[in-house]
């Protein structure tokens, strides 16, 4: 079994930065990790993903140039650096891991096998 624990959320002002961390423990052979977010009344959406071995990344258009996903395999940790935050970035952010035979980070939630509990990010205007 794999467990994921997010941290780093909080309340910030527009333009500020936050770094989310996700520690992956347990049977940690996973092929890809991703960050998703879900705002009240909206569906969970893909934010960014990264391949464990190659480090190849993928982003949703709305965060390109502002967010950076990275991983430290030695620490089994995935990060999401969020810069130039906007009020529309407000959501619960979830870390997810996939152990499927992925070539690129999946964008569909159902292709991720393990999920964290989420961390709240609130950006005030």
Image (cartoon, rainbow, N blue to C red):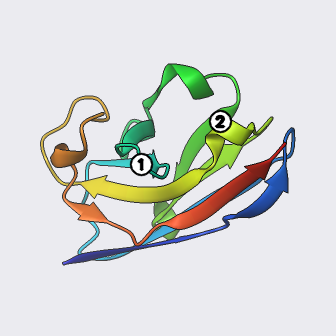
Q: Quadrant of residue 79?
A: bottom right
In front here: 44 or 116?
Answer: 44
In front here: 86 or 114?
Answer: 86
Residue that badge 1 annotates = 41
Q: Residue at x 29, y 69 (%)?
A: 28
**From the image, which quarter does the C terminus lie in?**
top right
Q: Earlier in the sequence, mark 2 or mark 1?
A: 1
Q: Quadrant of residue 107?
A: top left
Q: What is the count of numbered marks?
A: 2
Left or right, residue 94 beside residue 12:
left
Q: Is residue 98 above or below residue 105?
A: below
Q: Is residue 115 above or below residue 47?
A: below
Tell me the SS state at disc 2. strand
- Give percent across and percent down for residue 48: 47, 37
- Give percent across and percent down for residue 87: 72, 40
Residue that badge 2 annotates = 67
**From the image, which quarter does the N terminus lie in?**
bottom left
Q: Residue at x 45, y 66 (%)?
A: 76
Q: Residue at x 13, y 47 (%)?
A: 100
Whole-Å distance between the Cαs marked 2 and 1? 23 Å
Q: Residue furthest left?
A: 101
């Amino acid at each position: 079994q794999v467990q994921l624990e997010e941290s780093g959320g909080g309340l910030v002002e527009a333009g500020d930065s936050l770094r989310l961390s996700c520690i992956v423990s347990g049977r940690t052979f996973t092929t890809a990790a991703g960050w998703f977010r879900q705002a009240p009344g909206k569906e969970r959406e893909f934010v960014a993903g990264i391949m464990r071995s190659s480090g190849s990344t993928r982003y949703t258009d709305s965060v390109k140039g502002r967010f950076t996903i990275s991983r430290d395999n030695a620490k089994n940790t995935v990060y999401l650096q969020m810069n130039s935050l906007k009020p529309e970035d407000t959501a619960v952010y979830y870390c997810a891991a996939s152990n499927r035979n992925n070539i690129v980070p999946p964008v569909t939630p159902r292709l991720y096998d393990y999920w964290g509990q989420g961390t709240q990010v609130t950006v005030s205007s």
